[in-house]
Amino acid sequence: MEWNLKEIDTYAKKWIREAGDHIRASFSKTLNVTSKSNPNDLVTDLDKATEQFFIKKIKETYPDHKIIGEEGYGDNVTDLTGTVWIIDPIDGTMNFVHQQRNFAISIGIYFDGEGLIGLIYDVVHDELYHCIKGNGVYLNEKPIPKLTEAKISEAIIALNATWVAPNKRIDHQLLLPLVKDVRGTRSYGSAAMEMVYVATGRIDAYITPRLAPWDIAAGIIMIKELGGKATNLRGEEVDILKQNSLFAAKPGLHGYILRNYLKDGKW
Ligand code: 2AM
Ligand code: CA
Ligand code: CA
Ligand code: CA
């Protein structure tokens, strides 16, 4: 199949900016907030409307493309053949509701399983991070430099405090040595933003035991494009169709942390 990457990319950029305009315009209106799996798992009408907006545009323009969306309006996708859009309409919904900042729209586009286009839009700052594989990563059309190596003692890592307190998923003691040895930890509450911060070198690594395909589909493409590494916590390639753990980091540092801090964990 011949894919017109440039054309798909141009549409994706146009639609993501349109969706962002709509979200910014919503700040003056009252949000309808409900919860999903638990009282802290929030969703708003805007998460749903934004996902539906993308689906309408994609289906009108590319009826044979498949769509995976967090809010469930996409297709029931079981494999990655053909063109698959993986969409998180608002990543960081809790931030969106409480702060009206620190959230993003994330879109990864996969072609026969290979991630070739990634877009992450920081709506509030009007900053569009964008990548076509092999062509570099851009912030509003300005190229982002390749990642350089970093030392653990000077590293800032993104890690949610959830994972160093007793929790249902991992032994909370496992990450404590790493937390002690790095320069600092941060938690931004949006996986897509945290991945962009790794891609741009603002932080050195991001670790989380629990993410869904739409949280990481775009960010993984950008981090790899700039020479960083993004795997699961065991150091294996992530299966983009499944729930994953994620460990993204600068080159060098990724291997160092895996060998010295993660290799014995039961992730
Ligand atoms: P969301 O806002 O799109 O739901 C918060 O730490 C980050 O984790 C956000 O990127 C959030 O995405 C994501 N997240 C929240 N609940 C999750 C869950 N149950 N599984 C995977 N990711 C989740
Ligand atoms: Ca959610
Ligand atoms: Ca998300
Ligand atoms: Ca979301």
Image (spheres, rainbow, N blue to C red):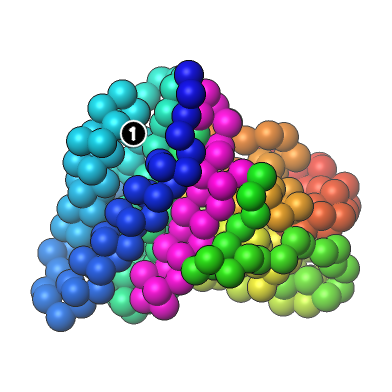
Q: Tell me: 197 left or right of 98.
A: right
Q: Quadrant of the C terminus?
A: top right
Q: Tell me: 134 left or right of 38.
A: right
Task: Say whether mark 1 is within 8 Å of ligand 4.
Answer: no
120 or 144: which is nearer to us?
144
Quadrant in which residue 34 is drawn: bottom left
Is residue 60 among the parts visible in the rendering? yes
68 or 254: which is nearer to us?
68
Q: Which residues fall within the magenta stretch?
A: 111-133
Residue 182 coordinates in the image, percent (x, y) = 79, 71
Q: Is residue 193 magenta?
A: no
Amino acid at circle 1: Ile
235 or 74: which is nearer to us?
74
Magenta region, main secondary structure: strand
Is residue 80 among the parts visible in the rendering? no
Residue 52 coordinates in the image, percent (x, y) = 20, 45
What count of labels does the image hold?
1
Relative height, residue 115 to residue 198 (above, below): above
Q: Is residue 121 magenta?
A: yes
Residue ID at (72%, 76%): 184
161 or 166: which is nearer to us?
161
Residue 228 coordinates in the image, percent (x, y) = 74, 53
Residue 152 coordinates in the image, percent (x, y) = 85, 67
Q: Tell me: 125 left or right of 39.
A: right
Mark 1 residue element: strand
Residue ID at (83%, 75%): 154
Residue ID at (41%, 77%): 125
Q: Which residue is mark 1?
A: 67
Specify few, some or many for label 1: CA neighbours under 10 Å numbering under 14, 14-19, or 20 or more: many
Residue ID at (30%, 54%): 15
